[in-house]
Image (tube, rainbow, N blue to C red):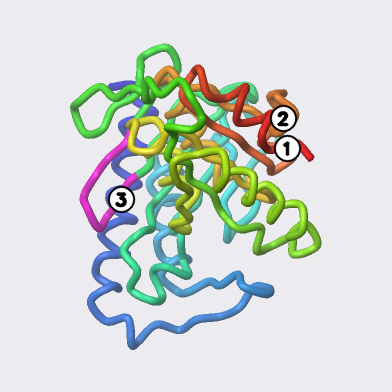
Amino acid sequence: MHPLLNIAVRAARRAGSIINRAALDRGALEVKAKRANDFVTRVDQAAESAIIEIIRRAYPDHAILAEESGRLGEARAEHCWVIDPLDGTTNFIHGFPQYCVSIGVQHRGALAHAVVYDPVRNELFTASRGRGAFLDDRRIRASGCSQLKDALVGTGFPFRELARVDRYVAQLRAMMTATAGVRRAGAAALDLAYVAAGRLDAFWELGLSPWDMAAGALLVQEAGGLVGDLEGGADFLESGDIAAAAPKLLAPLLAALRP
């Protein structure tokens, strides 16, 4: 395992242990609204602090982009860690067991390493560019699904961008008509990991942040899947709109999602 990935795994597991302990007493959670439908707890903050502490100890010169702390370190740093300490906070608050820790590492702007850790199921998804994607110690591959009508597709609601709901509803209607089924579980990083593992054949969402996508996108790519924005380009980290799919599904997925 690459040294950077090893640190990412250690940090993700540490954050996961904090999340699991807090899940035993959800009644004691202090919940704050960052904006409409977007929440943060002390667990998010404690998990993020633990991740940053481990990274800083090993790589003090690296930059960090984290959901709760924002951008830390030199903008010119060759490495940047993109962190979501608890993707699926609303699920966690309600005891809905679909949330994860997501850590991606960029090298000179390109995604290089990825960890998505599900503390509920103790499932660890990892990838390094050019070295494949893994679930624990087992190599994973995107599905071989070749037709949209046979596909199980994941999605997420644009809860941060309610002005785009009409566009999204049109896309959802198209997917409900064109596919075998649509699922919305509420943790984008874990949805992308499921595309990498072949549990979902495709996924799309609007209005995400880089920390929602960075690790999951590399997992999909290293599992043989395809990732892009909704125009078919590679600017999903900037635009916030992402589509990920088995190799033969991305083109028909994007065609179905267009107005």
- Depth check: give the residue in front, 146 or 156: 146
Residue type marked 1: Glu
Q: Circle 3: is it few (<14), some (14-19), or many (20+) Cα within 10 Å?
A: many
Q: Circle 1: is it few (<14), some (14-19), or many (20+) Cα within 10 Å?
A: few
Q: Earlier in the sequence, mark 2 or mark 3?
A: 3
The answer to if 254 sits in the magenta stretch is no
Residue type marked 2: Asp
Q: CA distance from mark 1 to mark 3?
A: 26 Å
SS state under label 3:
strand
Whether pointer 2 and pointer 3 mark residues with C-beta atoms closer than 8 Å, the reply is: no
Whether pointer 2 and pointer 1 mark residues with C-beta atoms closer than 8 Å, the reply is: yes
Q: How many marks?
A: 3
Image quadrant containing the C terminus: top right
Task: List the single residue furthest toward the bottom.
Answer: 27
The answer to if 123 sits in the magenta stretch is yes
* Residue sitting at x 45%, y 55%: 85
The part of the image, by quadrant, that contains residue 39 is bottom right
Give the residues in magenta: 117-125
From the image, tell me which residue sits under label 3. 118
From the image, tell me which residue sits under label 2. 235
On residue 238, which mark appears? Answer: 1
SS state under label 2:
loop
SS state under label 1:
helix
- Residue 48 seen in the figure: no
* Residue sitting at x 38%, y 58%: 99
Q: Earlier in the sequence, mark 1 or mark 3?
A: 3
